[in-house]
Amino acid sequence: MRRAIYPGSFDPITNGHLDVIERARKLFDEVIVAVAHNDEKEALFSLEERLQLLKDSVGKIDKVRIAQFDGLLVEFAVAQKASAVIRGLRAVSDFEFEFQMALMNRKLETGVETIFLMPKEEYTYLSSRIIKEIARLGGDVSSFVPPAVSKALVRKFAG
């Protein structure tokens, strides 16, 4: 079975993330959307909330599984018997960091490849950070994120 990990903080998941998941599904038998647990990064949504938003957004998509991980991504990939890590690239500015991470992951675990996927052009400007800022300022993000995320953002910033 060809299995890939699509890691991220997904704080929150956007339509750009969904597009990358759909693209990855066409290439692999199973895609594990893996939510990183990182105590050093202050998230808007808790790990439990992010997992639930992912389940609400992609939980019923065939060949997609949701998981959480902490520690080294390549160790998680090996434990899950995944042969690849999926990374989304929106712009050239993403590439330098992602390229460094891919090379380091290859050095740590030669059996796990990194695959870069680009979302549709209409999603290249989307980022979780920008979505949160628009929502915080009262803007409508419903065309940028799944419905469950849009509702959750409204609730977060209502008070």
Image (cartoon, grey):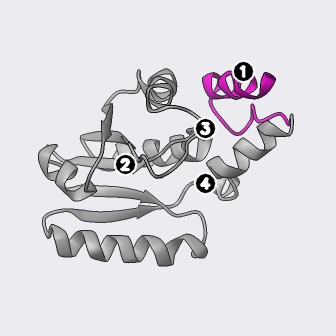
Q: Residues within 10 Å of mark 1 (few under 14, many from 20)?
A: few
Q: Nearer the viewer, mark 4 or mark 2?
A: 2
- Circle number at residue 83: none
Q: CA distance from mark 1 to mark 4?
A: 29 Å
At mark 1, the secondary structure is helix
Q: Amino acid at mark 2?
A: Tyr
Q: Position of residue 147 (x, y in %)?
A: 65, 24
Nearer-N-terminus badge (3/1): 3
Q: Nearer the viewer, mark 1 or mark 4?
A: 1
Q: Amino acid at mark 4?
A: Lys
Q: Residues within 10 Å of mark 3 (few under 14, many from 20)?
A: some
Q: Position of residue 131 (x, y in %)?
A: 71, 44
Q: Is residue 121 left or right of residue 26?
A: right
- Residue located beneath label 2 in the image: 6
- Residue located beneath label 4 in the image: 120
Q: Looking at the image, do the residues carrying marks 4 and 3 touch, with CB atoms under 8 Å apart?
A: no
Nearer-N-terminus badge (1/4): 4
Against 64, residue 158 (above or below) is: above
- Circle number at residue 44: 3
Q: Looking at the image, do the residues carrying marks 3 and 1 touch, with CB atoms under 8 Å apart?
A: no
Q: Is residue 56 left or right of residue 125?
A: left
Q: CA distance from mark 2 to mark 1?
A: 27 Å
Compare residues 29 and 78 and report the one nearer the observer.
78
Q: Nearer the viewer, mark 2 or mark 1?
A: 1
